[in-house]
């Protein structure tokens, strides 16, 4: 929120124009893919669902009603799920 408009624009531009398919396919360690279904910044249908398919050893969890900022606004639930995954 405190970065420059140009930095935000260039970051989003680079991220959205970069094909990460091969990188995701190369990851073999267990990976926890999580996203809220109310993410207004990155729709989960275009992100986490596809990522989970490309990752060889992933677990997908889509959180009903959670937003893009779920790591902060829902930290109690998210942190518990991360710890459970690591265990």
Image: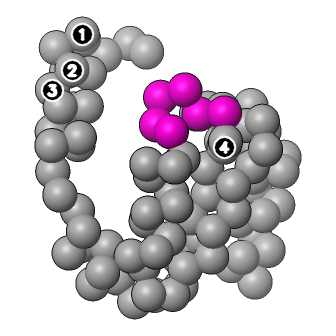
* Quadrant location of the C terminus in the rendered image: bottom right
Residue furthest to the front = 45
Tell me the CA gap for discs 3 and 1. Answer: 9 Å
* Quadrant location of the N terminus in the rendered image: top left
Q: Position of residue 5 (x, y in %)?
A: 24, 10
Viewer-closest of 26 and 77:
26
User: Helix, strand or loop at disc 3?
Assistant: helix
Mark drawn on residue 9: 2
Left or right, 21 with respect to 77, comes to: left
Q: Which residue carries the number 3 mark?
A: 10
Tell me the CA gap for discs 1 and 4. Answer: 25 Å
Left or right, 43 with respect to 13, comes to: right
Q: Which residues are magenta?
A: 38-43
User: Helix, strand or loop at disc 4?
Assistant: strand
Q: Which residue carries the number 1 mark?
A: 5
Left or right, 81 with respect to 35, comes to: right
Q: Are marks 1 and 2 in contact (CB under 8 Å)?
A: yes
User: Helix, strand or loop at disc 1?
Assistant: helix
Tell me the CA gap for discs 1 and 2. Answer: 6 Å
Q: Are marks 3 and 2 in contact (CB under 8 Å)?
A: yes
Tell me the CA gap for discs 3 and 2. Answer: 4 Å
Q: Which residue carries the number 4 mark?
A: 36
Q: For the point 23% across and 62% down, which residue is it?
A: 20
Question: Label 1 crowding class (10 Å Cα cut-off): few <14, some 14-19, many 20+?
Answer: few
Give the mark nearest the N terminus, 1 or 4. 1
User: Helix, strand or loop at disc 2?
Assistant: helix
- Residue 53, compared with residue 4, is above or below; it is below
Q: For the point 75% across and 69% down, which residue is it?
A: 83
């Amino acid at each position: 929120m405190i970065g420059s408009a140009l930095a935000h624009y260039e970051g989003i531009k680079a991220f959205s124009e970069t094909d990460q398919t091969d990188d995701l396919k190369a990851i073999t360690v267990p990976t926890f893919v999580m996203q809220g279904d109310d993410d207004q910044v990155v729709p989960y249908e275009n992100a986490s669902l596809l990522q989970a398919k490309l990752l060889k050893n992933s677990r997908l969890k889509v959180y009903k009603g959670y937003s893009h900022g779920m790591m902060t606004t829902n930290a109690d639930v998210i942190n518990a799920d991360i710890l459970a995954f690591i265990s």
